[in-house]
Image: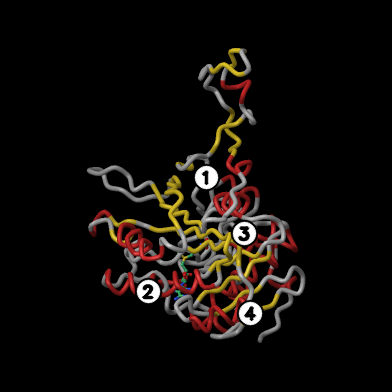
């Protein structure tokens, strides 16, 4: 395992100056990692973990591994017999993202994709507690019969005796693609499955959007009340269409340049707050930029996560180290591998 000095990794002087910012300097310092094969050999020497390795967090007990979600032995290696209250998995969607079919986000035949999904689903259920919840991000490609979303939903029926669907959440995706002769592709689907004893903290569902609608009159104890009087909150609930979540892009602090499939912290924090409690164990089998780990750290959960790619495992570890050192949730347009700039 390679030793890196933290201070060397987080050089804040790399931020654009005020003048550059005003001029709109927004270029990310790393190109999309999965589609740049020439970059991989340059990054690998800076990665602490190789295939099979696990980083044990000395501060909060998190774990990050370079492991394969489809291999039962790999999942056991990281969980070491512990069961999780919550699993948040964001596998590749079997779509070609941004016109690049890459090893990390690749497109295969739908039958092979369903088989891949079956393997990681079974590995997930093996380590999910009796009161556990499973959230799965999943895409649908309208240019290819909307696969794989419906195929995945049908696959999950095979497990309905042990876990049931509870909701289908749509998260607004402003960065979506579209054409002038179609609606913009503006959504990401989030499937929510739960064991029968799973708990749900409804307080986590409130947004920061104030209620505007009055009405819904109802008589309570002989008194006519309106909506606001009966309500527990001044704000609206998120429901299952999350319009208040901003997709991550390069102008946000949480952006991790080089990552093409990063999920918003706000969405993952909502999931964690709703479906787990402080001190619980949360798992994520497809770590990528490490959003679930960071969300868990911020909310007092332990997180075990892994990615099959050592570069993304390294980014995950760096992201939490960066957060602890600087309070920043990502690198925005700075380089998470500043060693590259110094070469
Ligand atoms: C869609 S991204 C996950 C994004 C993540 N939720 C985030 O917010 O950054 C999918 C990740 O899964 C990883 N991956 C692909 N196949 C895998 C496997 N068999 N086991 C573990 N990770 C895998 C890819 O390297 C990629 O980083």
Point out the tag, 3 or 1, that comes first from the N-terminus: 1
Q: Does the residue labelled 3 lie within 8 Å of ligand 1?
A: no
Q: Residues within 10 Å of mark 2 (few under 14, many from 20)?
A: some
What sort of colour scheme is used for the picture? secondary structure
Question: Which-is-in-front pick, marks 3 and 2?
Answer: 2
Name the residue beneath numbered marker 1: 245
Query: Viewer-proximal residue, 1 or 136?
Result: 136
Q: Disc 1 versus disc 4: distance between alpha carbons?
A: 34 Å
Secondary structure under tag 4 reads: loop
Q: Earlier in the sequence, mark 1 or mark 4?
A: 4
Going by the image, does 183 lie left or right of 200?
Answer: left
First-in-chain label (4 vs 2): 4
Q: Residue at x 56, y 60 (%)?
A: 132
Earlier sequence position, callout 1 versus callout 2 = 2
Query: CA–CA distance between discs 4 and 2?
Result: 23 Å
Name the front one of labels 4 and 3: 4
Pair 1/2: label in front = 2
Residue 337: x %, y % from top left? 60, 72
Sequence-earlier tag: 4 or 3: 4
Q: In this view, does 95 lie above or below 21?
A: below
Residue 153 visible somewhere in the drawing? yes
Disc 4 Cβ-to-ligand 1 distance below 8 Å: no
Residue bearing the label numbered 4: 80
């Amino acid at each position: 395992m390679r030793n890196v000095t933290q201070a060397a990794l987080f050089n804040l002087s790399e931020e654009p100056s005020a003048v550059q910012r005003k001029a709109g300097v927004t270029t990310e310092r790393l190109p999309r990692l999965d589609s740049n094969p020439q970059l991989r050999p340059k990054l690998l020497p800076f990665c602490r973990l190789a295939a099979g390795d696990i980083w044990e967090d000395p501060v909060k007990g998190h774990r990050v591994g370079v492991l394969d979600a489809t291999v039962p032995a790999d999942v056991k290696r990281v969980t070491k017999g512990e069961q999780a209250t919550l699993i948040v998995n964001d596998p590749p969607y079997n779509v070609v993202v941004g016109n690049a079919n890459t090893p990390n986000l690749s497109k295969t035949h739908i039958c092979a994709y369903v088989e891949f999904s079956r393997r990681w689903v079974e590995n997930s259920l093996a380590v999910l507690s009796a009161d556990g919840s499973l959230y799965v991000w999943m895409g649908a490609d309208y240019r290819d019969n909307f696969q794989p979303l419906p195929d995945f939903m049908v696959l999950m029926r095979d497990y309905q005796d042990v876990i049931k669907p509870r909701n289908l959440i749509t998260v607004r995706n402003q960065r979506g693609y579209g054409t002038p002769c179609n609606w913009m592709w503006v959504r990401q689907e989030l499937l929510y499955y739960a064991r029968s004893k799973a708990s749900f903290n409804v307080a986590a569902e409130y947004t920061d959007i104030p209620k505007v609608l009055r009405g819904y009159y109802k008589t309570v104890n002989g008194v006519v009340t309106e909506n606001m009087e009966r309500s527990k909150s001044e704000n609206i609930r998120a429901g299952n269409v999350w319009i208040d979540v901003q997709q991550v892009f390069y102008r946000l602090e949480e952006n991790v340049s080089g990552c093409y499939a990063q999920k918003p912290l706000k969405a993952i924090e909502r999931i964690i707050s709703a479906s787990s409690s402080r001190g619980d164990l949360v798992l994520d089998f497809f770590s990528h930029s490490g959003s679930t780990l960071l969300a868990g750290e911020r909310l007092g959960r332990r997180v075990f996560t892994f990615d099959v790619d050592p570069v993304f495992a390294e980014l995950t570890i760096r992201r939490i180290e960066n957060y602890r050192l600087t309070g920043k949730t990502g690198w925005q347009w700075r380089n998470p591998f500043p060693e590259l700039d110094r070469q």
